[in-house]
Amino acid sequence: MPFFARFERENWKTMSNTEGLEAAADAIGKAGDLALACHVGPDGDALGSMLGLGIAAQNAGKTVRASFGSPFVMPPNLGFLPSDLLVPPGDFPAAPDLMVVLDAGSPDRLGELAANASKAATVVVLDHHITNEGFGTISVVDATAAATGELVFDLLGLLDWPITPDVANCLHTALVTDTGRFLYSNTTQRTLQIAAVLVGAGASPTQIGSHVYERSPFGYLKVAAAALSRAELDVDARFVSTIVTQADLTAAGIDWGDIDNLIDTLRLAEEADVATLAKVQADGRVRVSMRSRGDTDVGSLAAAMGGGGHRLASGFTAEGDAAVVIRQIREAIEEYR
Ligand code: AMP
Ligand code: MN
Ligand code: MN
């Protein structure tokens, strides 16, 4: 089946996630070389699940290369993750025998590595986005998993590959970040059971917390102050929003990766169910992050705008004026409540 062809819904239903995971373990266990990729602008789950799998595979004797699409910049707050396996997208195998795609709901989330995936002999997809329509040769999509890291944990169990302290720290980072430190509604008993095993295997919650949540460059405070002072609240629509531009970042000497947690402050506004942060890139494209307290399905809203994500956390990229994009979202949210 061609890589970009969506699974027939009928076929899709014939492979359970358990069968999918077994097929994935079989393919990965037999491979000599592994090419791993996660979504562009990687977060803790994308990098943590990818590097956790990669290090475990390397320990099992595989040759591993891991990457993500441009811009190939390690997010500063994830710089503590062991990144020896990372190669720039230009050094990624053009036509891998086996490519594993992690935490990406569609091929376009791979940036330029989508081309490598389209030439790979086998593509294994491990993901938990509800908006994932099914792509790849072996697709394991479990929207009940809090993080792709949970799927990697199960995969390592099937492969009988040891969870070393490095692997544990990567996977724990995946769980911590995608669950908002185990507080979001995606956190399950199983998430916490896996976390307990990972901490027992050497993951360091203190190290992860101190890097991911407890530090930012001073310039972040300036950008956050500017963005929050411009925030607008529509009480009737229960909608709060603001815009950050490349010029804001340049003035403060920081990068996009430094403001990943800004949406968490914006969404504190208790009058709002939906918080929207519009990030205007240097090229003028607008990257939008959305969060809901629970009454709005922002995953479906983002999917309708050409993006994706989860019911309560999602995003998309748009062309055009940020204020117009924000108005379109505000006018659409009623449909998703
Ligand atoms: P973020 O706001 O970047 O933290 O993203 C929140 C959620 O939405 C994550 O699960 C992302 O994977 C997903 N997401 C963000 N941007 C996009 C996009 N352009 N297309 C699809 N999913 C996205
Ligand atoms: Mn992610
Ligand atoms: Mn994720």
Image (cartoon, rainbow, N blue to C red):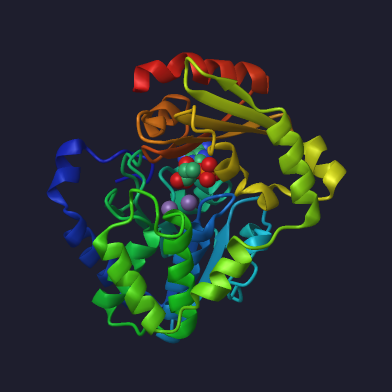
Answer yes or no: is residue 319 visible: yes
Q: Residue at x 43, y 77 (%)?
A: 168
Residue at the far right: name it. Answer: 251
Q: Position of residue 175 (x, y in %)?
A: 41, 62
Q: Residue at x 46, y 84 (%)?
A: 165
Q: Is residue 75 placed above or below 82 in the rendered structure?
A: above
Indicate the quadrant containing the C terminus: top left, top right, bottom left or bottom right.
top left
Q: Residue at x 51, y 24 (%)?
A: 239
Q: Residue at x 57, y 62 (%)?
A: 67
Q: Position of residue 313 (x, y in %)?
A: 44, 40
Q: Position of residue 284 (x, y in %)?
A: 72, 29
The reply, left or right, for residue 94 in relation to residue 219 is: left
Of 266 and 58, nearer the camera is: 266
Q: How many marks?
A: 0
Of 17 and 328, nearer the camera is: 328
Residue at the far front: name it. Answer: 270
Of 128 and 223, nearer the camera is: 223
Answer yes or no: is residue 122 visible: no
Q: Is residue 249 placed above or below 215 in the rendered structure?
A: above
Kindly indicate the quadrant of the structure image that contains residue 133: top left
Of 106 and 287, nearer the camera is: 287
Q: Position of residue 111 (x, y in %)?
A: 57, 46
The reply, left or right, for residue 209 in relation to residue 7 is: right
Q: Is residue 155 placed above or below 286 in the rendered structure?
A: below
